[in-house]
Image (cartoon, coloured by chain):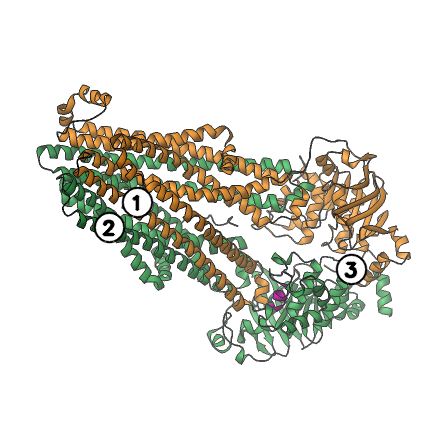
């Protein structure tokens, strides 16, 4: 699933992108501001707390008296209560921000995906899209929220400490802080390195996930091929390189902390050396020296945090680029504003003004190609009367599926028009058309849920009686009521708990529940029980009666029942007519027919039929 | 604890290294504790004039190196000492990081390999009933949870123990009463962590499940995009997605909120502890029960102690997660493997199959095969017709020892099947499943998958016989074309044909086609069968199909119905007698399929 998420990173800071991303956090600007304020407070208290201890030692312990201790205790208690509250608030607010922004961006991306045309899905595999909507959005939202936490805390800690140090002793502060620039550079360098190493580990990790997926899904096949041992050996190679890169990445991380520690200890050493001398000369007080030494110890933590945030920002930027490019993609097929205003959008259809549809279809001078250099349909013309049954016959690549894709407006003609009841279908909304089409796919593709859920798929508001009616019409009722849970039977992911034939019957019921004017049937090729096959055949007959229909036909009986057979070859109608007409013509169809049924004596078969 | 030990044992030779890593963190804490001492002595006794008050050894060292005067004029010396001590601390931290990672990665790798090969060798029936998504989750993210726990968390126990041990020791030496006060926080934090851990587990599971649900909705919507569009179903899909998306958001937030409570409360307790030490310490100092120096030491050490104590609380909560994860993996590993290999007859077979009174049932009382007898001579073709649930696939599983038969006998070349080695017999009898699995590799690799060495010419010949050579040649990259999500997606029929080619290159004396031509059109079906007859004349073939035209040319045809053979004979014989065969034949004469 994560296979395609690791892509090249844009190294430069992309300001426009971040402006875009910040737009998504704008609805939460109060949380953002609140969070920033809380983090400032956290950093402030963190910087002040050591002073409290010092105050206690200087005022109570050293003079050995307890006057004012009660007041001090209260102040201390208030401050730590405040800090506890701050800690709660920052986790709470950052969590709120993270989950809300992730939810919003994910929602926007999903809604966009619902509007994008099929051509987009041809280019992007499901795994890629999944990774965008899950891990990328997760990374982005967590950097926006927790990154802000660390940025504000680290930044204000650094500033506070620097200001205090500079205020205490300017010269000593400059000497001590001289380690900060190399510290920052090394941190940044290492964090980037570490991130790159972990990117490699991540990509290996997704390979391992893929290997597990294959090893488990393909286990039965592997058994029949006696490949268990070899599979395990190949897998062991993968885990070996995984181990090697993980250890390398870990060693890099393990090197980083000691380096930072040592560098900051140089700062401490400098403070002690130069500061100590100053104390001895009486230029500096003890208390100041102690404070200096403590602050140098405290200093490296925020520097490390900041370096981490900057490195993560880079990977978040890559994630953001991919997510936003998805959200900003314009669908190839859109309804014009005028149409959308009248008939509603895909996500909010307004059926009140939808015109009726009688079922007249015309392809006029249609040209189409998926890729410029490979034309599929050229100058294609076709007129279909309401209620007419059209069978599309032809070899793979002859243009059968393209005609269906254009008819359903999954794609639009490159030039030319498709007219429904005499009107260009671009003058109607996509939802209007698709609500009037019943479509049975070659692979039925059910969704997890009950049988009833699947039948009411095209009409969420359908009553139980309507669902049963649809099932009865296609004779699926018989097998459904024999199931222990009837219509409430779960079909499993992809409908896998049902047999192929049962899935097909349900997909017929699903297509019919909306009482569509236009019916598209892409017949399945795989053979199933002959009894079931008959049942499906009958279902098809009943469903098609009285509707304009386009059938990508594989079964002879279906073809024979069509009003008109279009024999397609290379994007053109080679022949058209009824079964008998075409056979009598002894042309391409006749040849195709003979080829298909070479196993039996087709000529004799033909004579028999023609004669009868 | 037992479960943690199980995982620990997977480190094998690296176990000592892991313990060394734990020790290294411990040693690094010694240096960590030494640095403030150097600072304190420098400030108090070098720059200031407090008496040293050190153990004799350190005192001697101090005097030998020149005493206070020398150190004072060379203040860079303590500075250097700090840096050196920190370098040592860093060195040991580096050892810790490196060794812990090596050991944890070793564990992860061994566990991964074991899980993978165990899954490979589990029985066929296990793989029939499995839940792929769940298994992958166990093998990847559960494993990752455990790896992280060992690599990052558990080693820190070394720090907590050393820190607590050393500091408590020094504290106790200084003042037992104050030590008691200073360590009050420890049981409180642990108690609190435990309660918190119980709640987090529940919240964590809920958020995790919500995430899985969200992914499922997303996955289904994206894979079914054609259907969604065709039925203008987008508004409803958005509604469903919105509900899942919000639920995921809320449950994730609930978990974070719990964390917010935990961290703020545990930090509060820690701050309170410092306050307590200050309060009690000041009073005792005022009463003259402890010295000022002692109090400063207590306050300083308390600050150092709190961090590992809080960390220990975190380890405790993560321990629970790891336990659950290890148990989930053990669940797989405890499944028995197929009793297997290298323990049976390995004899090249010719392909004579004799089955006598064979019965089999998956569940007691529900026979799937009932008293079946038939025989096939080498080079013969046996056709089998039967509806869903007639037991025909089970028969193929028994022949390849994917399941073991319970009653009756199967003899291959006169020897009982059970005497043969399982792996060997599967090499001799090539079974092609109805829905074969293709691996995400090139077409060439997929065909050569199960044969040790295949000449390119041999490979192409097999592809030609299986009628895929032409299809493959049309791809831009030919046999190098990748199969799967990033490569071409093949149709059901093309997959079936590749599976046939894959089995052909293995040169099995017996081949079983379990409805493995179902998605191939009649013309290609015929082409394949004719090519097989011509090129593999002495191959024994068992062909299962719904298609009479596929079965018609078999030497012998069996009709199975509810586990029994109800008809047998040749095509000519069977079309003459009334029964399932003839009825199917008549129906199919009406129904033909055009590609």
Which one is earlier in the sequence, the residue at label 3 or at label 2?
A: 2
* x and y, in percent, of residue B444 in the image: 64, 42
Quarter of the image for the C terminus of chain A: give it.
bottom right
Percent position (x, y) of residue A581? Answer: 78, 70
> Are the residues flagged by discs 3 and 1 from a single subunit?
no
Q: Is residue A444 above or below residue B256?
A: below
Where does residue B450 sit, x and y in percent of width and height? 67, 39
Q: Residue at x 41, y 41 (%)?
A: B315
Residue A445 belongs to the span the image colors magenta: yes
- SS label for mark 2: helix
In whole angstroms, how far apart are the C-alphas of marks 3 and 2?
Answer: 83 Å
Q: Chain of mark 3?
A: A
Query: Where does the magenta region start and end?
Result: A443-456
How many residues crowd mark 1 within 10 Å: few (<14), some (14–19), many (20+)? many
Q: Residue A77 got which mark? A: 2
Q: CA distance from mark 1 to mark 2?
A: 12 Å
SS category of the residue bearing label 3 = helix
Which chain is orange in the rendering? B
Q: In this view of the protein, can residue A177 be seen by the observer?
A: no
Residue identifier under label 3 = A530
Residue underneath mark 1 = B270
* Chain in green colour: A
Labels 3 and 2 positioned on one and the same chain: yes
């Amino acid at each position: 699933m994560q296979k395609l998420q690791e892509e090249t990173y844009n190294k430069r800071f992309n300001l426009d992108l971040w402006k875009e991303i910040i737009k998504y956090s704008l609805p939460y600007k109060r949380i953002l501001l609140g969070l920033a304020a809380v983090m400032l407070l956290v950093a402030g208290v963190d910087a002040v707390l050591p002073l409290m201890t010092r105050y206690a030692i200087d005022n109570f312990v050293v003079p050995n008296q307890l006057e004012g201790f009660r007041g001090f205790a209260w102040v201390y208690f208030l401050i730590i209560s405040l800090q506890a509250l701050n800690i709660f608030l920052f986790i709470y607010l950052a969590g709120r921000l993270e989950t809300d922004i992730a939810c919003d961006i994910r929602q926007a991306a999903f809604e966009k995906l619902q509007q994008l045309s099929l051509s987009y899905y041809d280019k992007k595999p499901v795994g890629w899209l999944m990774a965008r909507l899950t891990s990328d959005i997760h990374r982005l939202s967590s950097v926006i929220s927790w990154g802000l936490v660390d940025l504000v805390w680290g930044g204000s800690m650094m500033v506070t400490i620097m200001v205090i140090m500079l205020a205490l002793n300017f010269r000593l502060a400059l000497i001590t802080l001289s380690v900060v620039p190399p510290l920052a550079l090394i941190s940044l360098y290492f964090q980037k390195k570490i991130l790159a190493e972990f990117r490699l580990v991540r990509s290996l990790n997704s390979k391992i996930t893929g290997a597990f997926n294959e090893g488990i899904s393909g286990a039965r096949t592997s058994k029949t091929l006696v490949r268990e041992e070899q599979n395990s050996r190949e897998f062991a190679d993968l885990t070996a390189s995984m181990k090697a890169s993980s250890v390398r990445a870990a060693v890099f991380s393990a090197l980083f902390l000691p380096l930072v520690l040592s560098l900051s200890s140089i700062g401490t050493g400098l403070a002690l050396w130069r500061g100590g001398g100053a104390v001895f000369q009486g230029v500096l007080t003890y208390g100041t020296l102690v404070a200096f030494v403590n602050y140098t110890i405290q200093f490296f933590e925020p520097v490390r945090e900041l370096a981490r945030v900057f490195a993560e920002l880079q990977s978040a930027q890559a994630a953001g680029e991919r997510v936003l490019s998805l959200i900003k993609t314009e669908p190839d097929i859109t309804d014009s504003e005028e149409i959308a205003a009248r008939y509603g959008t895909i996500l909010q259809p307004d059926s009140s003004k939808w015109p009726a549809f009688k079922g007249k279809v015309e392809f006029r001078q249609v040209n189409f190609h998926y890729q410029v250099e490979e034309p599929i349909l050229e100058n294609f013309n076709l007129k279909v009367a309401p209620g007419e049954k059209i069978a599309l016959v032809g070899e793979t690549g002859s243009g059968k599926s393209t005609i269906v894709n254009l008819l359903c407006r999954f794609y639009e003609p490159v030039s030319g028009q498709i007219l429904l009841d005499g009107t260009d279908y671009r003058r109607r909304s996509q939802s209007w058309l698709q609500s009037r089409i019943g479509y049975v796919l070659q692979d039925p593709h059910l969704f997890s849920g009950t049988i009833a859920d699947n039948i009411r798929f095209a009409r969420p508001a359908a009553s139980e009686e309507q669902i049963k009616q649809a099932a009865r019409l296609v004779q699926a009722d018989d097998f459904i009521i024999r199931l222990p849970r009837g219509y409430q039977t779960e079909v499993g992911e992809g409908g896998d708990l049902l047999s192929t034939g049962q899935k097909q019957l349900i997909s017929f019921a699903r297509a019919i529940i909306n009482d569509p004017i236009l019916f598209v049937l892409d017949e399945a090729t795989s053979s199933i029980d002959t009894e079931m096959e008959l049942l499906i055949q009958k279902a098809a007959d009943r469903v098609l009666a009285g509707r304009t229909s386009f059938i990508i036909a594989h079964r002879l009986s279906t073809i024979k029942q069509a009003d008109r057979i279009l024999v397609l070859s290379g994007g053109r109608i080679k022949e058209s007519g009824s079964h008998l007409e075409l056979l009598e013509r002894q042309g391409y169809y006749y040849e195709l027919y003979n080829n298909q049924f070479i196993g039996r004596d087709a000529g004799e078969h033909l004579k028999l039929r023609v004669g009868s | 604890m037992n479960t943690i030990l199980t995982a620990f044992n997977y480190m094998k030779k690296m176990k000592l290294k892991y313990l060394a890593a734990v020790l290294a963190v411990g040693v690094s804490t010694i240096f960590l504790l030494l640095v403030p001492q150097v600072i304190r002595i420098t400030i108090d006794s070098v720059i200031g004039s407090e008496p040293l008050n050190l153990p004799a050894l350190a005192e001697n060292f101090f005097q030998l190196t020149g005493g206070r005067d020398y150190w004072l004029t060379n203040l860079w010396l303590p500075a250097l000492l700090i840096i050196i001590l920190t370098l040592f601390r860093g060195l040991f931290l580096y050892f810790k990081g490196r060794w812990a990672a090596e050991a944890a990665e070793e564990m992860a790798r061994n566990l991964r390999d074991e899980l993978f090969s165990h899954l490979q060798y589990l029985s066929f029936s296990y793989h029939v009933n499995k839940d792929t998504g769940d298994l992958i989750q166990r093998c990847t993210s559960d494993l990752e949870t455990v790896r992280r726990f060992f690599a990052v968390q558990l080693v820190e126990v070394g720090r907590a123990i050393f820190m607590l041990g050393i500091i408590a020791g020094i504290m106790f030496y200084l003042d037992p009463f104050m030590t008691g006060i200073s360590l009050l926080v420890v049981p409180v934090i642990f108690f609190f962590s435990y309660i918190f851990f119980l709640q987090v587990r529940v919240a964590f599971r809920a958020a995790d499940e919500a995430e899985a649900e969200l992914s499922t909705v997303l996955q289904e919507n994206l894979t079914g995009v054609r259907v969604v569009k065709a039925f203008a179903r987008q508004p409803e899909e958005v509604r469903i997605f919105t509900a899942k998306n919000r639920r995921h958001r809320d449950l994730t937030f609930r978990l974070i909120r719990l964390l917010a409570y935990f961290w703020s409360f545990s930090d509060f307790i820690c701050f309170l502890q410092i306050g307590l030490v200050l309060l009690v310490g000041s009073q005792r100092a005022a009463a003259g029960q402890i010295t000022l120096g002692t109090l400063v030491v207590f306050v300083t050490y308390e600050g150092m102690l709190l961090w590992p104590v809080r960390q220990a609380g975190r380890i405790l909560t993560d321990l629970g997660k790891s336990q659950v994860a290890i148990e989930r993996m053990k669940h797989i590993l405890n499944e028995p493997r197929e009793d297997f290999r290298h323990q049976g007859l390995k004899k090249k077979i010719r392909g004579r199959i004799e089955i006598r009174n064979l019965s089999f049932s998956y569940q007691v009382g529900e026979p799937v095969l009932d008293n079946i007898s038939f025989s096939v001579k080498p080079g013969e073709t046996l056709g089998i017709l039967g509806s869903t649930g007639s037991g025909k696939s089970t028969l193929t599983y028994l022949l390849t020892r994917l399941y073991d038969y319970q009653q009756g006998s199967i003899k291959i070349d006169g020897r009982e099947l059970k005497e043969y080695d399982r792996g060997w017999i599967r090499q001799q009898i090539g079974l092609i499943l109805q829905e074969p699995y293709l691996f995400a590799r090139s077409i060439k690799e997929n065909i050569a998958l199960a044969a040790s060495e295949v000449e390119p010419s041999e490979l192409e010949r097999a592809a030609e016989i299986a009628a895929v050579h032409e299809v493959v040649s049309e791809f831009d990259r030919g046999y190098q074309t990748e199969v799967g999500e990033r490569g071409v997606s093949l149709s059901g029929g093309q997959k079936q044909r590749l599976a046939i080619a894959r089995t052909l290159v293995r040169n099995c004396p017996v081949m079983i086609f379990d409805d493995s031509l179902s998605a191939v059109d009649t013309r290609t079906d015929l082409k394949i069968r004719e090519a097989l007859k011509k090129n593999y004349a002495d191959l024994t073939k068992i062909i299962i199909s719904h298609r009479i035209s596929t079965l018609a040319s078999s030497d012998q045809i069996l009709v199975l119905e509810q586990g029994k053979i109800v008809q047998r004979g040749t095509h000519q014989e069977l079309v003459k007698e009334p029964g399932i065969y003839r009825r199917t034949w008549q129906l199919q004469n009406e129904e033909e399929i055009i590609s």
